[in-house]
Each structure stands twice: as structure tokens, then as C-alpha cells.
Image: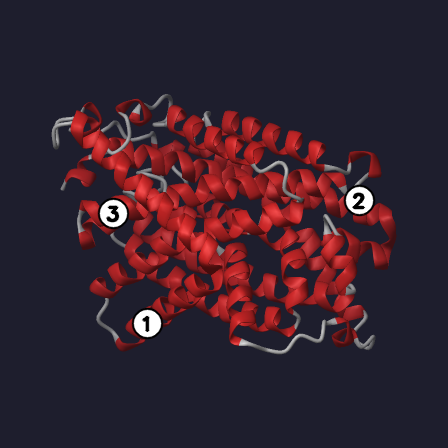
Amino acid sequence: MSVDAPAEKQLLGLWMTGALVVGSMIGAGIFLLPVSLAPLGLNAIVGWLISSVGALCIAFSLATLTRAGGAGIQAHIERAFGPNVAYLVTWSLWCSYWAGNAALAIAIGSALSWISPALAGPSFVIVVATASVVVLTLVNARGARAAGGMSVATVAIKLIPLVAVIAIAILRRADGGLERLPAVPLTLAGIATAVALTLFALTGFETATTPVDKVRDPSRTLPLAIMGGTLLVALLYLASSGSIQLLLPIDVVTRSGAPYADAIATQWGRGAASLAAVAIAISAFGCLNGAILATGELGYSMALRGELPAAFAKTRGANTPVLSQLLGSSLTVVLILANSSRTTASLFTFVILLATAATLVLYGVGALAAWKQSSGVARRAAIIVALLFVLFAFYGAGFEADAWGLVLLAIGIAVRVLMRTFNSRGSTPAAAAAPAALRE
């Protein structure tokens, strides 16, 4: 017998799911990323082009899987490769979310600290980051519709800084902005690093695959939301990030806590830039909202199968896994506090590379699963591009991030072994309560 489905009015429709995709993609990544990309020069622009194509191909692969329904990404991978591979993919994605959430939370504090010199400094950033995680965990505890409503409310605000810097770059088209790029030669290593960094900003479309039985008409809604949202964000990112590099000198970008606000200040003054900084903070806030939803759903999915303690499969209200949300948020706060001694830029770069490396596991396996479901030449060509891109992104993430990703997988295996010593296969309380689609 399956878990009681949430009432029809509690399900996410196309607009909310689309807002969840766009809202989860437009967050901390794009607004702080110029700090990490600035030293790479032209490599960064090439990296954006490659990442955009790769992300669209990966999104296509995941959209192909969601045509089977809305039981969650773990169920889709299970159908293709069985429970063991599905668990490792879900565990890795779950880790990427609570790690990446730290970067999102840090970006909120970093953007707000730009408004006044009195707010500058790591202490303010850490306090704001921690408080943001707590507040949005409370919002998500009210249910998926509350999280979806938050995404809709913040999407329009997210677009303001992106469109503003594009407009400034167009107004200054004759200023010779290319001269601002550092004289760094195009190299394979430079492009690979840029791809790994820019990919983090383009991740988030997979958030739509994480809710378990919470999307209305999922076989239609999910593919449309994933592909449409990814294409829109990729175009905005390519134009706005390139504009930042053309508008600001490299030394200004590398020292900036909010490069988009700095770029807007050069054209319309500090007042407009302060409003942009607030918009950037709200953008990261909205993105963190969707990521906390996904973190809770992934933990819930694993707990349903007895791969995490049964307590995390318990729900309240409209099938909301509150304890699972609390677990993910607690890990995010621990990561924020444990790395508080790093500078904002170095902490942000480390966390996004770690989160990207962990997310790549899903992208690679998801593309392989989509290959099994596809037969057309065009579809398989897109999936091959996705797989090649994933391999290149692993290379670009670097040894440290990839090594930590392997450590997280090893911890996941240890957790699963530990859980199996306490649970008989198929007889855990969580498994007994699992949706029927997950047990087929």
C-alpha cells in the first residue's frame, strides 16, 4: 500500500516547477563566480560556451528520464541500473546539495555586506548565512507548495542584476572592454577549470527531479520545466558573466564581494548598486530555498528504502519530510562554521568545486540511464555530448574536489553497510511505507 499522496492542490504545476528550475539555477553561482573566473581571462568565456552546451545535453538526458513519471531521481536510476547504483548517485547528489547550500548561504551574506562597510567581514557573512539556512528550513517545513511559492516570488527579482549588467555592456559597446581581460593564454587546463566553475552556476535543473510524487502531470511538466528553464538561464549567464569581465578590471573583480553590484555602480551609482546587492541576496535566498527542498527530498527518498534511518522517512502535513530537511540543513551549517576561517572567495571556490564534483556523478549515470531509454540518432548524440562533457568537467574540478567526492562516496557506502546490519532487506518500517512506484 502506498503512502497517501498529497492533495491535488498541494502538487507543483508547470509554473511552480519551472520557477523551481530557474530559481534553483540562478543563485549564488552566477553572482560570485566572476571572482573565481577573473584570472582565467578568455578561458572563462570559452568555458561558459562549453558549459552551456554540456548543461543543455545533461538536462535533456534527465528530462528523458522524467518522462517515466515523478517518483524521484532515485527511482529513475533504479529502473536502469538497480538499487546499488541508484543509492550511490542519490547519496552523492544529496551531499552536493548540502555542501552547495553552504556556498548559497555565504553568497547571501556576501551580497548584503556590500551595502555598508560596517557589514564587511567574515563574521557578518557567517551569521547571515547560518540564519538564512534556518529561516528557509522553516519555510520548507510547511510543504512543497510553500517552497514553490517562494521560488515564484523570487524569480523576477533574480533577473534584475543579470539584465542590468547586460544593458550596461550594450551601452558601453564602444569602450574597448576586451582590453580588460587579463593576458592569459587559452589552454586546455584553463578551459577545464573554467568549465568546472561555470558548471556549478548551471547546475540546479536537476532539482526538479528530486521531489517524490509532488509534481502534477510529471511526465509532461518535468521535461518542459527542465529544458525550458535550463535554456533560459544558460543564455542569461553567458551574456551577463561576459559583460562583467568586459566592464570591470580584473583587480576590482578579484577583490569584490559582489561584482555585479560593482558593475552596476559604475553606470548608475551606488544607490542603484545597493538595490542590486539586495536583489542578488534575494536571488541566492530563493535558490537556497529550492536546494533545501531538494536536500530534504533526497534524504527522504533514501530513508524510504532503509538507506538512512527510518526517522528521516517520517512526514507531516502534505507529505513533508521535516526531519530529513533538518538533517541536510544541519550539515550545511556545520560546513559553513567549519570553514569560517577561509576568505569568502577561497571558501566559495572550494565549496562549489566539491559540490560540482558530487553532482557530476548524477549527470554521468543519468546520461547512461537515458541512453538505455533512447534509440534515435539525435537523442543519443546529445547524450554522448553530455557524457564527454561530464568527463571533462571531472578533469576541470581538480584533484582536491574529485578526491573529496570519492571520500563522500566511501562514507555513503559505509552508511549503507551500517544500515543493512540493522535492517532486514525489504522489511524496514520506511520500506513498508514507501510509495508503490518505488517498490515495483
User: Which residue bears the numbered disc 1?
Assistant: 384
Viewed as shown, does residue 225 lie left or right of 78? right
Residue sitting at x 49%, y 40%? 290
Which quadrant is the N terminus positioned in?
top left
Q: Position of residue 266 (x, y in %)?
A: 85, 58
Whether residue 159 sits left or right of residue 324 in the image: it is right
Check disc 3: other Cα within 10 Å, few if <14, some if 14-19, many if 20+. many
Closest to the observer, 74 or 99 = 99
In the image, taking residue 304 as reference, residue 337 lies left or right, namely right
Crowding around mark 2 (Cα neighbors within 10 Å: few <14, some 14 to 19, many 20+) is many
* Separation (CA) of disc 3 from disc 2: 45 Å
Amino acid residing under circle 1: Ile
Label 2: which residue? 274
Secondary element at image label 2:
helix
Residue occupied by mark 3: 86
Residue beneath the point at 48% across and 45% down: 20
Query: Which amino acid lies under the numbered mark 3 shown in the image of this protein?
Result: Ala
Question: Could you tell which of marks 1 and 2 lies nearer the N-terminus?
Answer: 2
